[in-house]
Amino acid sequence: MKKEEFKLTKKLEHIAFIMDGNGRWAKRRLLPRHLGHKEGCKRVIEIVRACADLGIYCVSLYAFSTENWSRPQDEIDHLFYYLDDFFNDNIAEFIERGVRVHLMGDITRLPEHSQETIRKSIEMTKDLKKHVFNICLNYGGKDEITRAAKSLALDVKNGVINLDDINEQVFENHMMCANLPPVDLMIRTSGEQRISNYMLWELAYAEMIFPVTPWPSFTKKELIKCLKIYEGRNRRFGGLKNE
Ligand code: IPE
Ligand code: IPE
Ligand code: MG
């Protein structure tokens, strides 16, 4: 008999991942760290496919933080080449599945070839509506909030908006996450239990799961295990009701 496919019953519009543990995965196999990132890219497309099949609207992925510039240049160079390969290999499938590429982070510090790949991928998928692939590159939660504050301050200075009209929604409209739903579930792989400057605003009411599996081993099966845990969570949003 065929095994029952897992189905989501709880609302899950936005799932966000901190893809951690690539380096340790490689080290355990006596491989250079960058091969962990290469293997990790295979999990990215596997997880995107699985999420799309489960009807999840938005998948966010932490690919490079504002702090990751402190890594060895050779590792950084490899990461950005793998990023190019990822988009070149998968953009046709994104288009087929109706996945729009959305970017959070300032890519102007990235190598020219990666900036081009990202801009092209965004352009090619800009009218797609079914899913969002939100890639966070040279992204930091503090940086996102600081830029929003600056842009809002400029609008006040120029008389575009009154100080008294600023509220959470107006603030969010100035953030990189404007128009994305709030994160329902955040998964950080590899057992580390911290946020590392990821989506500080967007995670306000997210459920969080920290599987010990490193990202290159985080298959669809591992994802389903996490989703089963999520299904059992009681989301109260400050009230008393069980959602
Ligand atoms: C996450 O894996 C990938 C990026 C930060 C780009 P790591 O490279 O941090 O792997 P570990 O944490 O050293 O094992
Ligand atoms: C977070 O992982 C950043 C990404 C996954 C892109 P790190 O490995 O950089 O985080 P820390 O340094 O362990 O907190
Ligand atoms: Mg790490």
Image: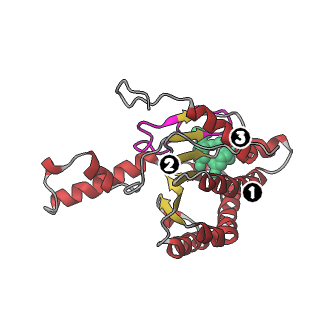
The quadrant holding residue 226 is top right
Q: In the rendered image of this protein, does residue 122 appear above or below residue 182?
A: below
Amino acid beneath label 3: Glu
Q: Going from the N terminus, do you reach mark 1 or mark 3 first?
A: 1
Q: 143 or 104: nearer the eye?
A: 104
Which residues, given as a range, are shown in magenta? 188-207
Q: Residue at x 75, y 54 (%)?
A: 34
Question: Would you name the residue on which mark 2 appears?
Answer: 14
Q: Secondary structure at mark 2?
A: strand
Q: Horizontal and vertical percent for residue 86?
A: 68, 65
Q: Secondary structure at mark 3?
A: helix
Question: Would you name the residue on which mark 3 appears?
Answer: 222
Q: CA distance from mark 1 to mark 2?
A: 25 Å
Residue 130 as seen in the image, left or right of residue 28 = left
Amino acid beneath label 1: Lys
Q: CA distance from mark 3 to mark 2?
A: 18 Å
Task: For residue 21, say whether it is visible.
Answer: no
Magenta segment's dominant SS is loop
Q: In the rendered image of this protein, does residue 222 appear above or below residue 65?
A: above
Q: Which mark is residue 49?
A: none
Q: Residue at x 61, y 32 (%)?
A: 229
Amino acid beneath label 2: His
Q: Marks 2 and 3: in contact by CB < 8 Å?
A: no
